[in-house]
Structure formats: structure tokens, C-alpha cells
Image (tube, rainbow, N blue to C red):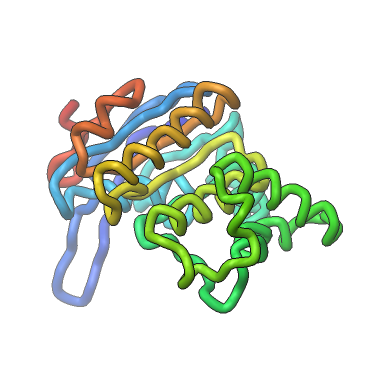
Amino acid sequence: MIRLQNIAKVYRTTNIETLALNNISMDIAKGEFLSVMGPSGCGKSTLLNIMGLLDDPSKGSIQIANQETGSLNDKQLAKFRNQKLGFIFQSYHLINDLQVLDNVELPLLYRDTTARERKKLASEALEKVGLSNRMKHFPTQLSGGQRQRVAIARAIVGRPEIILADEPTGNLDSAMGNEIMDILINLNQKEGTTIVMVTHDENMARKTHRLVRLFDGSQVS
């Protein structure tokens, strides 16, 4: 589902060159749940952003769902991201002025779908994460765990083949973190969604199929 070959990422300023990723190669199978761990600043989020086509590698190639992404222009990349990928962020990235249902609908605005269909799909996504009774609430009226559930609903509303999750349980207590993990595991097992999750939590990582560790931009296991 995802193939990275010899990925490197270098950030340059006038006086400093920082190697964020160094020669990363990995294959992630369809239906796999992979976790990525490592100390702060080791390149985990950079790797996830490159997998998600939000950032370009300085070197190397990315293939997603048999598509070589380096040949796509900006418009094609945006369409590909919208159709194939769902994103979950640690800080939720919800729009506080929009109700929960409208937040979940957002990715569908970039597709050729009717307003009625958008509401139907958003309602179904919220039902999957147990928030059918919060559709008309605003994000500020929800707990942290509920906001993360909304973020998951938004990520899955377009039925992506791949979900990329950056510290999805990082801002939550252990009980709520386990509930979020249960939702992700359910998506993986019942719907076959491929998931790549960055985490600092060894207990959460143990619940996934495979663990990749990074250190100073290099893969160490």
C-alpha cells in the first residue's frame, strides 16, 4: 500500500543544514497497522508528512496504492490525498465556529457530492465513532476525547484506504486513549484500513501489527 525508497529530507537555512530523515526505505502492506516510535526530533512527524504527501522528500521515491507520486502535479496530489488518505492530528485541527457535523463534512467539499450525500456520509462516520448525539454541538462543547473522535470521523468520512495518525492519543488520559485506539483497531480489522500511527506510547504501539523505530532521522528497527 505504501512503499518508500531511499527517502531523505534535508532542511536548509542560510547557515545550517539539518538532516531530518536519512535513507528510509520501507514497505507497508495493505491492511497493516504500523506504529512509528522514537525520541522527540527524530523525524517521526516528518516521515508521516512525507507519506501523506504534505511535504516533499529531498531524495527518494514514494509509491502509494501503486501510484508513483513523484509524477503528480499539485492539483493531482491534492485530489489523490483527498481520495486515498485520511489524517488524524494530535491537536485535532477542528474549526470551532462549525458544528461537529460540518467539521466532518469538510473533506467531502472537495468532491463531486451533493449536500444531502455529504450529511449522510458525515452522519455515518460520526455513528462509527459513537458521536451520533453530538452532531449539532460545537468543538468547544466537547471533551478532548470527543474532539479526537470527531477528528477520526473527519478522517474516515471519505472512506480512505489509508489513515495517517500523528500522536492521536497524545493529549488524552489513558482511559480515553485506549478508547481512541479501540476505534482505530476496529477500523483496521473490520474495514481493512491501512493505518500508520506515530506515538510516544509503548503500550499503544504494542497494539499494532508492527513497530518501526527512528533515531536521529534513521530507521533503527
What is the count of numbered marks?
0
Q: Quadrant of residue 27?
A: top left
Does residue 166 appear to the left or right of 192 in the view shown?
Answer: left
**Quadrant location, the C terminus:** top left
Residue at horizontal 61 percent and vertical 54 percent from the top: 133
In the image, what residue occupies the spot 48% across and 69% down? 141
Can residue 33 be seen here? yes
In the image, 19: left or right of 127?
Answer: left
128 relative to 170 in the view: left or right: right
Examine the rendered structure and indicate whether residue 78 appears above or below residue 42.
below
Residue appearing at x 66%, y 65% in the figure: 102
- Position in image of residue 173 (x %, y %): 25, 49
Instruction: Depth check: give the residue in front, 54 or 188.
Output: 188
Quarter where residue 114 is shown = bottom right
Can you name the residue that lies furthest to the front here? 133
- Observer-nearest residue: 83 or 193? 193
Q: Position of residue 107 (x, y in %)?
A: 65, 57
In which quadrant of the rendered view does residue 64 lie?
A: top right
Q: Position of residue 203 (x, y in %)?
A: 21, 32
- Residue 74 appears in the figure: no
Residue 192 placement (x, y as % from top left): 56, 24
Return the residue nearer the eye: 64 or 112: 112
**Above or below, 39 relative to 95:** above
Q: Between 215 and 179, which is closer to the camera in this rendering?
A: 179
Name the residue located 40 percent from the left edge and 41 percent from the top edge: 180
